[in-house]
Image (cartoon, rainbow, N blue to C red):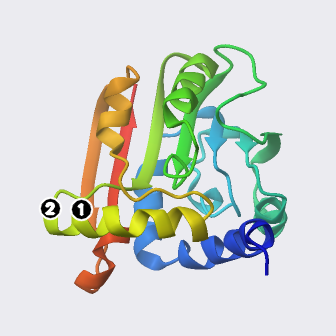
Amino acid sequence: MSLRVWSEQVVPRLTDLSLRGHEIGEQRERVCAELIGHTLEIGFGSGLNIRWYPPEVSGVSAVEPSDVGWELSARRRARSAVQIVRAGLDGQHLALPDASHDSALVTFSLCTIPDPDLALREIRRVLRPGARLHVLEHGLAPDEDVRRWQRRWEPVQRRVAGGCHLTRSLPELLAANGWSSEWSQECYLPGPRLGRPWTYLYSSRAR
């Protein structure tokens, strides 16, 4: 199997399976709370956030590069009362008007986007003044022994997981791009210590 076939056909399916668990669902529910109005979602994937949209969400502009991921979301989209429109393929270059959205959501995508700084600037452009960005990501752990393994595994991770990084720090990315966090949480998901390079999660709501 070629790396291209693996990335385009297998990775989206593995992502859907690995990120639908109960513990991650609880994290999704918390980070989706207080989304409002016309919402931008970067890295829509297979639609795993749909069940957690609060009633205040009136519509979603979904940015998703993977056709397989979009197809996997079809059943979830069909069951949703929220109108969801695929609005682009690249979170770094949004073909959307300035100040056109009331909130934004990014989950498990800033780890993979080649230039997360550019994506965060684009989100700022598309959001109305004072609107919130809601983010859930995995990334750089606080413990040096875990960081060492993250640095060792990152080249393999990027190759087999569609460019996913293990060593990006969400707080640093947000602060560097002018976002001020109003609420944040960091934790390891429950499980064996061997999994910690992949299971340190950041949640944040920022303006």
> Which quadrant of the view contains residue 196?
bottom left
The quarter of the picture where the N terminus appears is: bottom right
Of 160 and 17, which appears nearest the observer?
160
C-alpha distance separating marks 1 and 2? 5 Å
Q: Position of residue 203 (x, y in %)?
A: 36, 50
Q: Which residue is pictured at 45% across the width and 78% down the height?
A: 22
The quarter of the picture where the C terminus appears is: top left
Q: Position of residue 97 (x, y in %)?
A: 74, 16
Q: Circle 1 is placed at which residue position?
A: 147
Q: Which residue is pictured at 58% across the width and 66% down the height?
A: 159
Q: Position of residue 109 (x, y in %)?
A: 55, 51
Dots 1, 2 in contact, CB < 8 A: yes
* Number of the label disc, if any, that sits on residue 144: 2
For the residue labelled by badge 1, is the local secondary structure a helix, a strand or a loop? Answer: helix
For the residue labelled by badge 2, is the local secondary structure a helix, a strand or a loop? Answer: helix
Of 27 and 199, which appears nearest the observer?
199
